[in-house]
Amino acid sequence: MLNPEQLAAVNAPYGYNLVIASAGTGKTSTIVARIARLLEEGVEPQDILLLTFTNKAAAEMIKRLEQKFGKKAKDIEAGTFHAVSYRWLKNIDSRLVLKQPKELKTLFKSIYERRDFSQVTEIKPYAASSLYDYYSLYQNSEFIKSFGEWIALKNQEHKELAPIYEDIVLEYEELKNRYGFLSFNDLLLKIIENKNAIKKFKEVLVDEYQDTNNLQGKFIDALQFDSLFCVGDYDQSIYAFNGANIDIIATFKDRYHPVNVFNLSKNYRSTKYILDLANRVIINNERIYPKNLEVMNRKNAILPKLLAFEDLYAQYEGVAARIRASLTPRNEIAVIYRNNASADGIEAALREQGIGCKRKGGTNLFDLKEVKAIFDLLAILINPKDLLAFIHILEYAKGIGANIAKDLYEALVLCGEGDLKKGLLNPKDLKDPFTKRARNYQLGLFDDLGQLGSKSRFQGLSILDNPVLKHPKLSQDGALYLNELAKLLRLRLKRPQSFIEHIVDSFIFNNIKEQLAQQRAKRKDGSIDPTLYNEAIHKIERRAALIVHIAKNHNDIYKFYNAMVLGSSEMVQGEGVNLLTIHASKGLEFKEVYVLDLMEGRFPNLKLVSKGGSIEEERRLFYVAVTRAKEMLYLSYAKYDRVKKQEFLPSRFLQEAGLVD
DNA sequence: AAATGAAACGTTTTT
DNA sequence: CGTTTCATTT
């Protein structure tokens, strides 16, 4: 049932509509009802675009609409900015390959490391990783200045270095292009470039509008629509580090004419005590518009409780003990923290007390070597020129490192006329596929590659006639790996599930499995612990089976691969108590909430504040954290860290909340 | 150029 | 604590 405020928003005329929806005011229901109304009015589902912050949020809203409208709700264009961009780009080019940010960072770093900064200035240059982060932030926020200009303006001390930075970025873009990689940012940038390829929508709805950054803002500008419906809350903007620009929601009225602004002020989620506490703290931020929340939840109001502990680990144990004693169902309890570093402590304490829990984010499935290997093999299968995946796989062959792998890659691409797979299976018979290297030798830039070897060094391989086998430093193992890779590539498969099954059954994957298990079972003296070894093998096989299982839900191999890149962090495994960062908790609600590590320095995270963050943003984080709670809220801190021998003061937010003096 | 073992390092948040 | 980097040997 909708209240009059919600109804007013739902019935807004076509045009520019902004809904200010504070925490717990039924934002999702309002968006769902708005879409329902559009459908009832006869708007075609495919003419509605719903942009959300996570794919899970989009899926939930569509699910609710399906209950009322059946299958037709699935035709609504819905998802994150990135997921939707990907879907559209796929219509233009069906073979896109997304890369994990971590991988791209490695590529970036390899370019960075070839530069010499020492001649230019005394200033210590940004580390490769920071420079990459700055570049990503630049892409998300700046459209007029060049990267060099932008970074020079941001930090005058680096002005001398800016041309080098800019050159690195240029080369990075070039390489990314050559290897056929797309980053998350590229998805949006490409859509903005190709805006004519996108059809016109009747209405575009944007959820979590306060966390829109300039790139996403530009994306919305690139769309054609009759009507725009944005929903957000200034006090819940917590993505400044990703370029989220609070001005976008604040200047909505100035950028569009005429606008209708709706305000949802009735909070259905939390009790009065919880809301009062949240408001006492957020009031310390400058107000853009007044906030008078009306409390609708009047049941069992329990006072929020401060939990103070002498030591960090006493805190984790204490919170776990409380959860064990709690009568609330485990999956309605959440433990929320500012920094992922808090997660291990609380997870261990919960496990120790036999309490199941599920963690979102943190250990990405993709971070596991065996999972990475599966997807690298898949990448080689579907991307004709994936250098990084090729190097990663060949590095498991004895006698091959990054350098030889790169030689082989370039030679294969040369023999395959731009296609790695062709170079391996149907190579042009070049006398010397390593000419590039030889030319460098003539310039005196590199050591001699040595005499080309003979292909007949190797026997019994099905790729015996491949000219890249002439590489003088290629080992038996290396040749064997290339041969096995060729066998894998020769398969003509369709369904993602068969792809993954064949990868998992392959010689290469089993060899990698063996190597990883041995590594993981190694004792200090170098011997292998057989129990650990069997355990490791078992774990790897279970994970491989999990990937096969996930693949069953997909029909298109490209879509499957990219869905894994786009959505791997949204997957959660396990049952029980929810462990989340504040950022991950956005949009969720729980009956009972614990906020951990409320110490000055850690939360607010003052290191970040000094590096360009802001105390206001930290305060909004606190606001988001406490407003996840429906009935019970526990705020916890420790006075001392025994391991780091560090004393803590309670967070200033606890003072502002009136819980400590 | 690769493999191995020893030492240092560092820890923000997400699509 | 586990990963990343460095130094040494082959």
Image: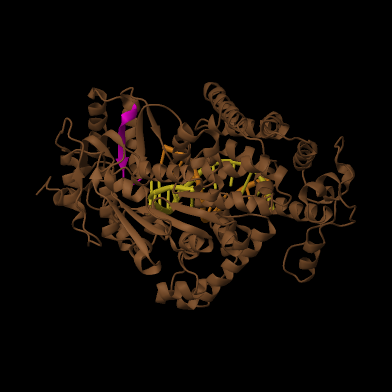
Chain colours: A brown, B yellow, C orange
Q: Nearer the viewer, residue A590 or A202?
A: A202
Instruction: Pinpoint residue A405: horizontal percent, then vertical percent.
Output: 71, 50
Q: Residue at x 75, y 42 (%)?
A: A478
Q: Is residue A583 visible?
A: yes
Position of residue A331 measured from the top left corner of the image (x, y, whole percent):
34, 28
User: Bounds of the magenta span?
Assistant: A331-339
Give how far across and how far down residue A72 sits, in percent.
55, 38
Q: Quadrant of the N terminus of chain A?
A: top left
Is A3 placed above or below A82 here?
above
Q: Please provide percent x and percent y for residue A94.
A: 69, 49
Is residue A363 in view from this perspective?
Answer: no
Measuring 55% from the left and 71% from the top, which residue is drawn there? Answer: A166
Quadrant location of residue A317?
Answer: top left
Specify the quadrant of the image occupied by residue A193.
bottom right
Residue closest to the eye, A210 or A492: A210
Q: Is residue A485 magenta?
A: no
Give the mark count.
0
